[in-house]
Amino acid sequence: GEDVEQSLFLSVREGDSSVINCTYTDSSSTYLYWYKQEPGAGLQLLTYIFSNMDMKQDQRLTVLLNKKDKHLSLRIADTQTGDSAIYFCAKSGGKLIFGQGTELSVKP
Amino acid sequence: DAGVIQSPRHEVTEMGQEVTLRCKPISGHNSLFWYRQTMMRGLELLIYFNNNVPIDDSGMPEDRFSAKMPNASFSTLKIQPSEPRDSAVYFCASSLGARLAGGGDTQYFGPGTRLTVL
């Protein structure tokens, strides 16, 4: 069946880069997404990448897609305390299949 | 654009009571999704609609849960009777629902309804 996996926790120091990883089992998706959820809030779309792309950059965010290994990553440059949140990857297919979320903790 | 609107934002009720959660999707979006989020189970898709028609309700936990979409701008999720294990945050999301170049599957989430059943 369809599955999306993420590690549950990541801790970094302010100013460092963060890399959040995601793997998936089904490669038929058209789009892959990254959402951010701050405490007490809904999921906010951060960025998405089309499946025929390898990389997409948007300011401090870089998304890398390795279709062969079915691996997606989100790199946040110069991580700030305001980046502390849960990050979800998701793959498309009519409905979205979400990973469990990675809780990013940024320490000053 | 107001985004996806959900009401109420918080609901506290007693076991056995009926609970109705409401959602207004983004205007022009054709697909609407109801999710439940708990610490134990994470984010679960309960049901989704396309053009007001339920497409997949396999995530609805049991017969106590029902969802309707009477028109393109309104949906409800009802729990009757409610139980303490239904306590969770319920999210509504909407999308264009078409395979467009800009990511037609992209879902936009509401702020959620935090439900507590005592």
Image (cartoon, coloured by chain):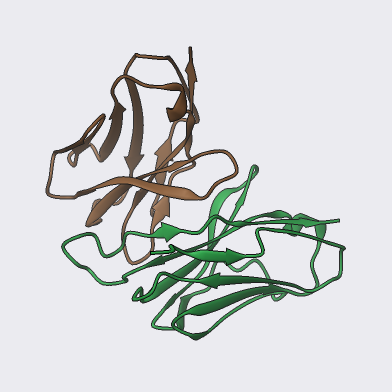
Residue A1 shows up from this direction: no
| Residue at the spot 12% in from the left edge and 49% down from the top edge | A52
- Horizontal and vertical percent position of residue A99: 44, 44
| Location of residue B97 by image quarter | bottom left
Asked whether, in this view, residue B62 is left or right of residue B108, the answer is: right
Quadrant of the rendered image containing residue A87: top left
Above or below, B3 relative to A4: below
The tint chain B carries is green
What is the tally of numbered marks visible in this picture? 0
> Which residue is at a point 46% across and 22% down the rendered structure image?
A81
Tell which of A28 and B72 is nearer to you: B72
Q: Chain A: give its colour.
A: brown
Q: Is residue B27 visible?
A: yes
Tell me: residue A19, above or below residue A50: above
Rendered view: A33 above or below B76 = above
Q: Is residue B59 above or below residue A19?
A: below
A34 left or right of B15 in image: left
Q: Residue at x 24, y 54 (%)?
A: A31
Counting from the top left corner in percent of width and height, residue B61 is at 65, 66
Q: Residue furthest front?
A: B1
Counting from the top left corner in percent of width and height, residue B16 is at: 86, 70
Q: Quadrant of the N terminus of chain B?
A: bottom left
The percent position of residue B89, horizontal first and vertical second, equals 64, 54
Q: Point out the image quarter for the C terminus of chain B.
A: bottom right
Observer-nearest of A24 and B29: B29
